[in-house]
Amino acid sequence: MIANIYMFEGAWEKATEPPQMLKFMQAYEQTFPGTRVHHRSFRNGEDLAYYLAKIPARQRALVYIACHGEVGLLDPSDKKSRITMAALLDILKSAFPQRIGFLHFSCCHILQPDDGLRRKLLVSLQEASGATFVSGYTKEVGWLESTLLDLALIHSVYVEWRDKPTHVSKPMKSLEDLTSDYRPLIKKLGFSAMSSFGNKNQVLWPRKICGQ
C-alpha cells in the first residue's frame, strides 16, 4: 500500500522562489520506496483549494502544508494572501470524504497554546477535513528542526497507520515512541495533535502544554 504525501508549500522569501522543502521530502521518498511525494507550490487559498480537489477520493493521504504562519492563519506569500482559519476550514470542507487521512501544518504558531483553544481548533480542523490525525505547532519553529520532526512524524506514525488504518493500538504506540524519542524537540516547537485512530474518540496530545 503506497503512503501518499501531498505537500503544499508556500513562499518563504519571495513569491517566485523555487521550492525549499521539496528536496528533503524527495530524499525521504527515495530512501523509503513505499511512499510517494506529490508537491505543489501555493500562494493563496484558491491555489490550496484547487490542489486539494485533485487528490483522488478515498486515498486517506497525508496532506502536509508548509508555509509561514501566525496564530490562526496561514501566510503562504509574504503577507499578501493570508488564509484565515475560517477560510481554511471552508477549503478543507470541500475535500471529498476520506481524501485526507493525516493533516499536518509545518507552520509557526498555527495552533494556540491555551489548552481549551488548542483543542477547539484541532477538533474544527479534524472535522472539516475528515482526517484521522491533525497536527501542528504552537510556537515559532526553525525550518531545520521542524523538518526533522515532520519527517519523524511521517515515518513513525503516518506510514505505520497507513498500512493498517483501522488499528488503534499500533499508531498510538508509534505516537508514544515519537514522544519518547523526540521529547526535547517536541517541547521546544510546541508540537500538538488530535487523533481518532480506529474511529475512536478524539484524543488531544499532549493534554497540557507547559512552558509557553
Image: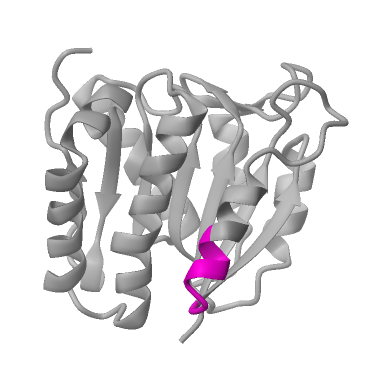
Residue 98: x and y, percent? 48, 72
What's the residue at 37%, 20% (across, down)? 139
The residue at the far right in this view is: 16
What's the residue at 20%, 26% (across, down)? 115
From where the camera sits, is residue 124 visible? no
118 versus 47 height, above or below: above
Query: What residue span does the magenta drawing correspond to?
Result: 28-34
Q: Quadrant of the C terminus?
A: top left
Q: Quadrant of residue 102?
A: bottom left
Residue 61: x and y, percent? 51, 68
Q: Tell whether position 193 is magenta.
A: no
Residue 169: x and y, percent? 11, 71
* Badge count: 0
Comparing 171 with 96, the one in front is: 171
Horizontal relation, residue 184 to residue 88: left or right: left
Q: Quadrant of residue 158?
A: bottom left
Residue 208: x and y, percent? 12, 28
80 versus 85 height, above or below: above
What's the residue at 19%, 55% (across, down)? 175
